[in-house]
Amino acid sequence: MTAKKRRKKRTSLPLWAATKDWLKAFFLALGLLIFLRFFLFDLHSYSGSSMEQTILPGDVLWVNKVRYGPRMPLRLIPQSWVNLLLTTDSLTPARQLPYWRIRGNEYPRINDLVLLNAPAPHHVPIDRRSRKIKRVVGLPGNKIELKDANVFINEEPVENVSNLKWYYLLELQRSVNQQQWIEEQALANVVRQAGHNRFVVNTTRKMSDSLAGLDQVVSVSKLKAHNPDDLNPPFGTIAKDWGPDDYGPLYIPHKGYTIELDSSVVDFYGYHIRYHERNHLRVSNDSVFVDGDYAASYTFRNNYYFVLGDNRHNTSDSRMWGLVPESHMVGRVSRVFVSFDKSAGLFKKIRWSRWGKKIGHFE
């Protein structure tokens, strides 16, 4: 009897040893994955039209976190970690931690593509707010202004990237078979205007110039964007006259920037001081009180950025949200990891030409 028990014990040892080795390998791989995803890179599946032409729906983007430095956890239980194993729906919300990040190789530059958390709604923890891809067009310390849809920094025009899109009014000759011509030019989302031969097209400046050179085209002209219902810039009374194509001028605060406080300054920057700097503001007889104390000046604690979508007449961005604090920046979009066309047939779903495609600074 004793011999049998010993034999059973000896035969079970190799199985337990193999199981321990497998568990060690599993948890080591899991730990490595968490480390790499948190400190080095992230993946973001893109859908929508905000960055149309530069990024296509179905692109899975590689986000470099080393460039700007990885952002440290903003909650005790970061959702992206926990969701590797289980859902957080049943967990109580963890209190948001102070923002800080490991220093990166560089700061965001003009025309960088960035993955960020949208700067609203404010009752939701920062890292749980919706993630967006936008292009940086204004840096901390810049004075930015849009004139006729062109960006000016410190009163100097910013060089446009090649893939920016606007709405254009296209007029064709009446003798043209319009539907056939539009299909031949591969124009998508074309809207017929009043009149038999006028259409609104959403396209790039290069494409609009090419269309203007065709014999069947009478004219192509860029449209002035109408103020959408959601354009409500959080910059007070003065911003009520701003529009998508004519916006500003606006000075972008940087960390350590001090302003003299009065009612007009609070009207202009008050939204950001309240919701991004987390202060209580009150104005009484043109005197300003910050967190209950009288204040003649205020010093910003965050760097801010102004971002736009590449589809300039069909996007939500800083013109609606206001400035984006540095704490909302996740990382720089550097390349397309993989890409799938969900609307294509079974054997054409994979866009092989976009796999690994680098997204350049002026893409």
Image (cartoon, helix red, strand yellow):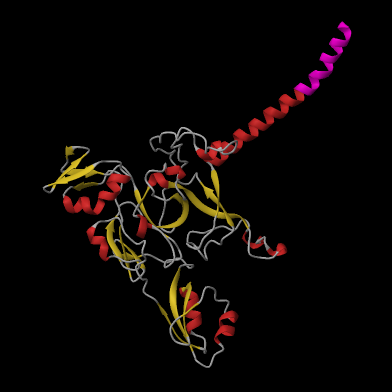
**x and y percent of residue 188 in the render?**
54, 73
Q: Position of residue 117 (x, y in %)?
A: 44, 48
State left or right for residue 293 relative to residue 125.
left
**Place of residue 259 in the rendered image (x, y in percent of width and height, measured from the top left):** 21, 48
Q: Residue furthest left?
A: 285
Pinpoint residue 194: horizontal percent, then vertical percent: 43, 84
Task: Examine the rendered structure and indicate whether residue 32 appears above or below residue 243.
Answer: above
Q: Residue at x 27, y 41 (%)?
A: 279
Q: Nearer the viewer, residue 199 or 100?
A: 199
Asked whether residue 105 appears in the rendered view, the answer is: no
Task: Please say whether residue 52 is visible from this viewpoint.
Answer: yes
User: Which quadrant of the figure has residue 34?
Assistant: top right
Q: Residue furthest front?
A: 90
Q: Residue at x 47, y 53 (%)?
A: 132
Residue at figure coordinates x 50%, y 81% from the top left: 211
Whether the magenta-drawn stretch holds residue 8 is answered as: yes
Name the quarter where the N terminus is drawn. top right
In the rendered image, the vertical position of residue 204 relative to residue 16, given as above or below: below
Seen as rendered, the residue at the extreme bottom is 175
Count of labels in the image:
0
Asked if residue 91 lies left or right of residue 317, the reply is right
Tell me what residue is drawn at x 16 percent, y 49 percent. Answer: 262
- SS assignment for the magenta stretch, majority: helix
Camera-nearest residue between 296 and 355: 296
Q: What span is in magenta?
A: 1-16
